[in-house]
Image: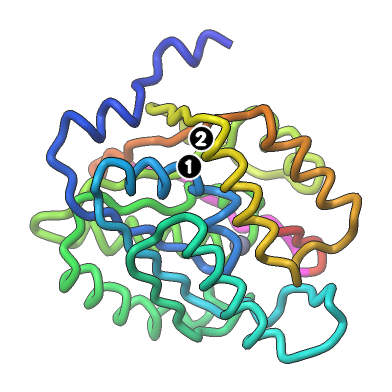
Amino acid sequence: MGLTTKMLDLHISLNKTSVNKLLAIFPHPDDESFCTAGLFQLAQKNDIKTTLICLTKGERGTNSLGVGNLKKIRTKELELAAEVLGIDELLNWDFPDLNLKDTKKIWSEKLKRKIDKLNPDIIVTFDHSGITGHPDHIVVSTEVLHILKEMKKPPSLLWRIPDEQEKAFFRENSSLIFASKPTHILKYGFSETLNKIKAIYTHASQMKSFRFKIQILEWFLFDHKELYCKVDLNKKYTHKFVLKKQRLII
Ligand SMILES: [Zn+2]
């Protein structure tokens, strides 16, 4: 693609700089495993303390188990995934799933206070496409950027950027705008890949079908990388809410 040659190695960048704390912010249980499983694991290897804020309990997701309280089920699944990925601190809040856009004012204040208190060196979240186009993903991305722009001493902001495979898959479902370009590539080994798949599979309630589980293997088993963009806080990034709720996938 030519793009790869221009990207910096994120693992090397993390080693070079004095990064002590990494904060990942995502809206749903399972976003962390699908998107940044490699990053959490390599952060742990580099003795970087990791915190995950998950804004909802994912109660509007599917329940392929067919029984039980989805909030409780997904809370437990997220705890297990956090263990698999070696996440040091897990904060699973309870803001309304599929409704973060309309409740932004409420959760944004709490998020801002937590960022101030934690004082991380790096924050990671979705890019403005949300990869899948989920409105919760997009609003978390735009709001985190907004919060950081207001800070006197903001941490570095990394966006998880979709790769060509992810773009192709999710573009089929919508007219998503993939505006930001990757600046960093994170490569990891086979053991991290197996752990990533294990973490995704802990979200058993979201495994809609056997076919979907196979799809996950096809996506990740031989693709040992995650793409990131280091955000320029002075730059203007575009976004658009495109997906209708019933068409959401992840
Ligand atoms: Zn999600």
Chief SS of the magenta region: loop
Instruction: Looking at the picture, tell me which residue is in the foreground, 111 or 89.
Output: 89
Residue 28 occupies quadrant? bottom right
- Range of the magenta residues? 236-245
Question: In the image, what residue occupies the spot 37% across and 51% down?
Answer: 124
Task: Estimate how packed mark 1 is, as few (under 14), some (14 to 19) or many (20 or more) residues with alpha carbons within 10 Å.
Answer: many
Q: Which residue is mark 2?
A: 226
Q: Are marks 1 and 2 in contact (CB under 8 Å)?
A: yes
| Amino acid type shown at disc 1 | Gly
Q: Where residue 100 appears, x then y in whole percent?
A: 53, 76
Q: Is residue 245 above or below residue 227?
A: below
SS for tag 1?
helix
Residue lying at the far front of the rendered structure:
191
Residue sitting at x 31%, y 81%: 110
Q: Which residue is found at the position 51% from the left and 58% from the top?
A: 84
Of marks 1 and 2, which one's residue comes earlier in the chain?
1
Q: Position of residue 209 (x, y in %)?
A: 89, 59
Check the image and name the residue furthest to the left: 152
76 over 220 or under it: above or below:
below
Res 28 seen here: no
Would residue 156 be seen by someone viewing this image from the given angle? yes
Q: Quadrant of ligand 1?
A: bottom right
Q: Position of residue 236 (x, y in %)?
A: 35, 43
Identify the image quadrant of residue 243: bottom right
Quarter residue 108 falls in? bottom left
**Could you tell me which secondary element the residue under label 2 belongs to?**
strand
Q: Residue at x 41, y 57 (%)?
A: 86
